[in-house]
Image (cartoon, rainbow, N blue to C red):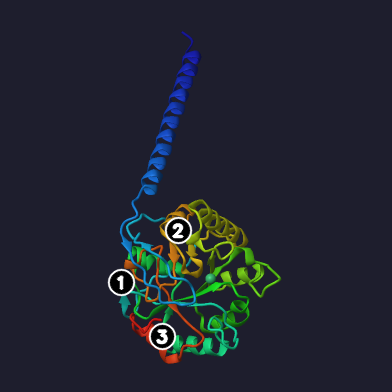
Amino acid sequence: MNMRKTKKSIAIILGILILVAASVTTGYMIQVRTSEKQSKSVSAYKGMKNASSQSKVEQRPESAVNNETIEQEQPAKTLVREFKDGPLKYNDKGVPILYYHSIDYEKGNELRLPKEKFREQMQYLKANNYTTLTLGELYEFIQNNKPIPEKSVVITFDDGYEDNYTNAFPILKDFGFKAAVFMISSNVDNTQFKVLKSTELKEMEENGVEIESHTVNHDKLSELSYNDQLKTLKDSKEFLGKVLNKKIDYICYPYGMFNKDTIKASKEAGYIMGFTTVGGWADKNDGIYTLNRVYVSAFDSMEKFKRSLTNPNYDRK
Ligand SMILES: [Zn+2]
């Protein structure tokens, strides 16, 4: 018997065995991942809540799905700090999410807040030791009960007015504040309107202002078919993701309009958290895809602004 031949055939048999073992394992892993995905996608949308809208600017949502039980993926790369000092709170309490539009005075337009008034509000937040949360921190708080400072606030802007860059951004930087802009994706680099350009979006994103989706064309989601909703949710996510080279995780529904399909389509498109225009502080009972926000009108007094930050049941309108 030739020893070299025997050794060679043993080596071949071993090789085949390893290959078979490897392919069986891979197949198994693929199966496990697929069934994981399937079990995620069939997660039930539990419970309905009647949404009572407070804002007269954007339309009232019809209903919200309480989806806090849905399994979630983790946010992409947004900053999530560990808060340890000072009084903290957990998600049995809420957090005010302010929402603005334009930061530029225009007579008689409640959507356009003069920048001086915006600075005064930011100054108030600073003087009173408020922490401005990133959307990732908000997500971790609502979804995973990660504690946040008792005096926390989230600052958001809808639509993507260019004055968010020229007027609001320098003020936010002065105070070292985090914020987020929900951008209408078809408006990026549109020279017909005073809207944010891709260079401005990138600069803001790199300096503490997250850019997230507000659909492609400021679409009235609840008036669209499921597939059309999915399309605008996906397309805006993909477009902004390319511009900013990041995963777009969050969606804000234009006019505050959404329905059950919107929640389902947002999830299918890959968003992990959604924002409405229903007034009041956001908390876990809202559902992660249907978070309340605090509307800041240009007509509001400083006293009202303070009340909306200190009282979860401020005089909403
Ligand atoms: Zn809007």
Q: Is residue 80 visible?
A: no
- Quadrant into which the C terminus falls: bottom left
Q: CA distance from mark 1 to mark 3?
A: 18 Å
Sequence order check, earlier mark of 2 and 1: 1
Q: Is residue 265 visible?
A: yes
Name the foreground residue: 219 vs 94. 219
Mark 3 CB within 8 Å of ligand 1: no
Number of on-image labels: 3
**Mark linked to residue 65:** none
Q: Tell me the CA gap for discs 3 and 2.
A: 36 Å
User: Which three-letter amino acid code belongs to the residue tagged 3?
Assistant: Asn
Q: Are marks 2 and 1 in contact (CB under 8 Å)?
A: no
Give the Cα separation between the discs numbered 2 and 1: 28 Å
Which residue lies most toward the front here?
Answer: 223
The amino acid sitting under disc 2 is: Thr
- Please name the residue that numbered disc 2 is placed on: 262
Mark 3 or 2, nearer chain start: 3
Which percent across, then down, holds residue 146?
34, 67
Query: Which numbered tag is attached to residue 90?
Result: 1
**For discs 2 and 1, the disc positioned in front in the rendered view:** 2
User: In what element is the residue under mark 1?
Assistant: loop
Q: Residue at x 31, y 56 (%)?
A: 46
**Pick the front one: 63 or 298:** 63
Q: Secondary structure at mark 3?
A: loop
Secondary structure found at label 2:
helix
**Amino acid beneath label 1:** Tyr
Classify 10 Å Cα crowding around label 3: few (below 14), some (14-19), many (20 and above).
few
Q: Mark 3 highlights which residue?
A: 129
